[in-house]
Image (cartoon, helix red, strand yellow):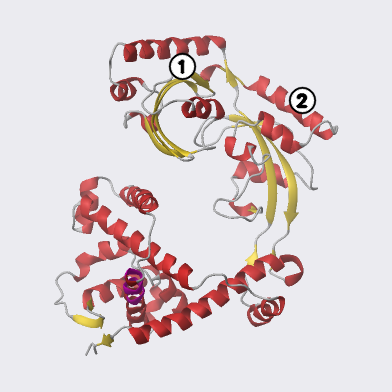
């Protein structure tokens, strides 16, 4: 538990530290350690201790917690000092994106911006900067670690030694499935299409007469996510947009505005703002279809025919997914649903949405395909989908026989940590560290 807590807190956590600062603001501060020329204040250590106590009440019984946390702060400052000496580079763009995402997440936990600022005791601009500094420090340390601890491999014998040493501590994997999907969004009536086209044509005429794109988007776009931003979608990677929108957007020159572009959502007018490699910065105005006039039965009939063709051997599920699925992210993978941020093709069954769990539970053998059915998610538009079970793995503890690749990855990570600890011990000898007694 001690090692886990210190590991979690090895890099400053802005949110809790900021919230808890008011609890320590009136306590006389003093220096508890010095790393090189940089002091560590008692208030900083107090915040870490309070943070752990808040998250892990049982930690109050740990007499070594304060000592271990101080060591983790010292290690962090040593690593940041070394990162600066080595001129470690960071991706400022990704830091900005991560900082904005984290700020938005924190902001969502408060009734208003003023409430958040009052709780943190600082203006939102300072909160944003603290978040950015925290993420930048983490990236500096991660990049420093990768620079000095890289190209680590393990042999078969090292993997097996790791397994024998850690087998009782290895995680129990939940039941996992590999699943592919084909999704169709029901088409709307011609009457609904005509109404949306009339609206987008009127907006197009106003653009041609010189009215502001951003103003028209704010006033008339049916996309709630971008309307208040003047239609701005920010930077998007190639492959993230529906095909017809993406094709039109990539065909524009910076500053150029498209004519009406149809997608399943409605008609769009698109303006390309800039292009960087495989990313584009675009804004749009949407005249949405009236989805109260959709034809669900037609989509079910289409996928039923696709299902019969696959079952009769006329085509593969993957080929049909690429051809028919309206989900661009899985369509390009032959319909395969991949866990977010993981190369593992298995999905944790317990983490699937209830409607998908129910469908998958009825698929017993690899290759079985569910009948197409209409699904209405809690959020988002209804769709019709069918799923193919690729494989199913029962819940089990990791073993070399069935999970050697996973064990090998864990063994590599364990070896990296050992090498990192050795390297960190060497760094400690290069940087002057003074720890004062707290009594």
- Nearer the observer, disc 1 or disc 2? 1
The residue range painted magenta reads: 78-84
- In this rendering, position of residue 284 left or right of residue 346: left
Q: CA distance from mark 1 to mark 2?
A: 32 Å
Q: Which mark is residue 305?
A: 2
Q: Residue at x 33, y 52 (%)?
A: 106
Q: Residue at x 64, y 36 (%)?
A: 331
Q: Residue at x 70, y 62 (%)?
A: 395
- Residue 317 in percent (x, y) is at 75, 37
- Residue 256 in percent (x, y) is at 39, 23
The first of marks 1 and 2 along the sequence is 1
Question: Which of these two is toward me, 80 or 368?
Answer: 80
Q: Residues within 10 Å of mark 2 (few under 14, many from 20)?
A: few
Which image quadrant for residue 88? bottom left
Q: How many marks?
A: 2
Question: Which of these two is toward me, 337 or 362?
Answer: 337
Above or below: residue 200 compared with residue 166: above
Above or below: residue 197 compared with residue 81: above
Tell me the SS state at disc 1. loop
- Could one spot residue 324 in this view of the protein? yes
């Amino acid at each position: 538990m001690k090692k886990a807590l210190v590991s979690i807190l090895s890099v400053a956590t802005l949110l809790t530290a900021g919230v808890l600062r008011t609890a320590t603001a009136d306590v006389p501060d003093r220096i508890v350690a010095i790393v090189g020329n940089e002091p560590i204040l008692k208030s900083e250590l107090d915040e870490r201790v309070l943070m752990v106590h808040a998250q892990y009440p049982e930690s109050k019984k740990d007499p070594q917690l304060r000592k271990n946390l101080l060591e983790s702060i010292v290690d962090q400052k040593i690593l940041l000092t070394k990162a600066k000496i080595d001129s470690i580079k960071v991706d400022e763009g990704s830091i900005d994106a991560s900082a904005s995402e984290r700020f938005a997440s924190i902001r969502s936990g408060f009734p208003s911006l003023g409430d958040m600022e009052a709780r943190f005791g600082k203006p939102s601009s300072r909160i944003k900067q603290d978040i950015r500094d925290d993420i930048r420090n983490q990236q500096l340390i991660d990049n420093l670690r990768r620079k000095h601890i890289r190209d680590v491999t393990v042999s078969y014998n090292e993997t097996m030694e790791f397994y024998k040493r850690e087998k009782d501590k290895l995680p129990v994997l939940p039941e996992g499935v590999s699943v592919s999907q084909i999704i169709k969004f029901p088409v709307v009536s011609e009457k609904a299409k005509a109404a949306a086209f009339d609206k987008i044509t009127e907006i197009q005429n106003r653009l041609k007469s010189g009215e502001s794109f951003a103003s028209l988007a704010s006033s008339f776009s049916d996309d709630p996510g971008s309307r208040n931003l003047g239609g701005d979608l920010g930077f998007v990677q190639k492959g993230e947009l529906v095909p017809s929108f993406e094709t039109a957007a990539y065909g524009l020159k910076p500053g150029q505005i498209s004519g009406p572009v149809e997608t399943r959502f409605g008609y769009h007018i698109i303006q390309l703002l800039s292009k960087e490699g495989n990313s584009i910065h675009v804004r749009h105005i949407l005249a949405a279809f009236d989805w109260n006039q959709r034809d669900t039965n037609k989509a079910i009939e289409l996928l039923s025919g696709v299902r019969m063709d696959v079952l009769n051997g006329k085509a593969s599920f993957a080929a049909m997914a690429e051809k028919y699925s309206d989900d661009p992210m899985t369509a390009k993978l032959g319909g395969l649903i991949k866990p977010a941020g993981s190369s593992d093709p298995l999905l944790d069954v317990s983490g699937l949405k209830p409607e998908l769990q129910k469908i998958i539970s009825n698929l017993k053998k690899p290759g079985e395909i569910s009948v197409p059915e209409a699904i209405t998610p809690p959020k988002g538009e209804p769709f019709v989908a069918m799923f193919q079970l690729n494989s199913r793995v029962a819940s089990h503890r990791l073993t070399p026989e069935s999970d050697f690749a996973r064990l090998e990855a864990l063994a590599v990570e364990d070896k990296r940590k050992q090498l990192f600890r050795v390297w960190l011990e060497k760094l400690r000898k290069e940087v002057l560290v003074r720890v004062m007694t707290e009594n």
